[in-house]
Image (spheres, rainbow, N blue to C red):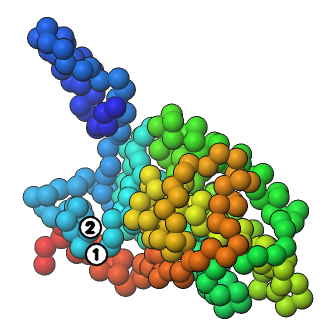
Amino acid sequence: MQFMGKDNVPFHTLSFPATIMGSREPWKLVDYIKSFNYLNYDGGQFSTSQGRGVFMDQALSILPADYWRWWLLSHAPESADSEFTWENFQVSVNKDLADVLGNFVSRITKFCRSKYGEEVPAGGSFDARATAMIEDLETRVRAYEGFMEAIEVRKAATELRTIWTLGNEYLQSAAPWTVHKTDPEAAAAMVRLGLNLIRLYAVLSEPFIPDASAKMLDAMRTDDRAWPGPIAEALTALKPGHAFATPEVLFAKIADEEREDWQKRFSGIRN
């Protein structure tokens, strides 16, 4: 497997393989090439000479790698050129990573700690709402697998984001913080499902955000990275009594002031 920009495709599919074959030596020929279009920067092109654009060393000095991994993969220029803008980057980080995934992990772990302690609670069973969500997850996870196997990166990222959203919507709808007041066992089953979702999300998300995935698994006190078979089974991996830790904030939101500062700093405009 090789990944490359579209301008290198003729060389790597024609002239280079021909050279290898002409050498009469037993070199391995590439099995599959995945090419990408161009990534542009805020209405123009990246330029090192003009200081236009944010480059790897600069990017990692202002935000952790997963923030950049997520944006670059979820906006991969597969069928057409893509354009990086700071506004789009801010929205993607804040909505996808902070509001959806990070918020889910924070809410369920903090609620469990406050009502049941830092271990997976026992009691109750999955209700109709949980069953429906699990069935939806089964469909979505299998679709995600298909996109990953086909190396359709953007479609896989979109599916993964939807998988995260299902957990958030379930938690908001089930409202264990309200149910707990009248039926603690029913709320315990909701919380148990939510904690197992964190482990599932960590496994599914590792190709896109490996650092956050490791933090989620560490918080759940497990090194079980087994890819899920039937989702209903995967969501019982953490048994009642299994200890966990309430993690730090997974993803911090990007403030408007930060975005404006970075936009100006990497614009290539010299004062």
Q: Position of residue 12 (x, y in %)?
A: 24, 25
| Residue shown at the point (14%, 12%) measured from the top left | 25
Distance CA(mark 2)–CA(mark 1): 6 Å
Q: Do we see residue 93 in this rendering? A: no
Q: Secondary structure at mark 2?
A: helix
User: How many residues crowd around disc 1 within 10 Å: few (fewer than 14), some, or many (20 or more)?
Assistant: few
Name above or below for residue 172 compared with residue 212: below
Question: Residue 265's image quarter?
Answer: bottom left
Determine which of the numbered discs, if any, sits on residue 59 in the image: 2
Q: Amino acid at mark 1?
A: Ile
Residue nearer the viewer, 3 or 242: 242
Query: Residue drawn 46% across and 75% down?
Result: 251
Q: Residue at x 58, y 37 (%)?
A: 146
In the image, 33 versus 38, the foreground residue is 33
* Residue 163: percent from left, percent from top: 64, 57
180 vs 130: above or below: below
To which residue does mark 1 refer? Answer: 62
Give the amino acid at mark 2.
Answer: Ala
How many marks the image carries: the answer is: 2
- The answer to whether one can see residue 64 in this image is yes
Name the residue nearer the viewer: 149 or 63.
149
Q: Secondary structure at mark 1?
A: helix
| 152 vs 82: above or below | above
| Vertical arrangement, residue 155 with respect to residue 122, above or below | above
Using residue 251 as the reference point, say whether residue 189 is left or right of it.
right
Quarter in which the C terminus is drawn: bottom left
In the image, 255: left or right of 51? right
For the residue carrying disc 2, how many other residues have a C-alpha within 10 Å: few (<14), some (14-19), or many (20+)? some
Where residue 109 appears, x then y in whole percent? 61, 80
With 44 as the anchor, is 180 left or right in this view?
A: right
Residue 119, given in percent of the width and then of the height, sits at: 64, 80
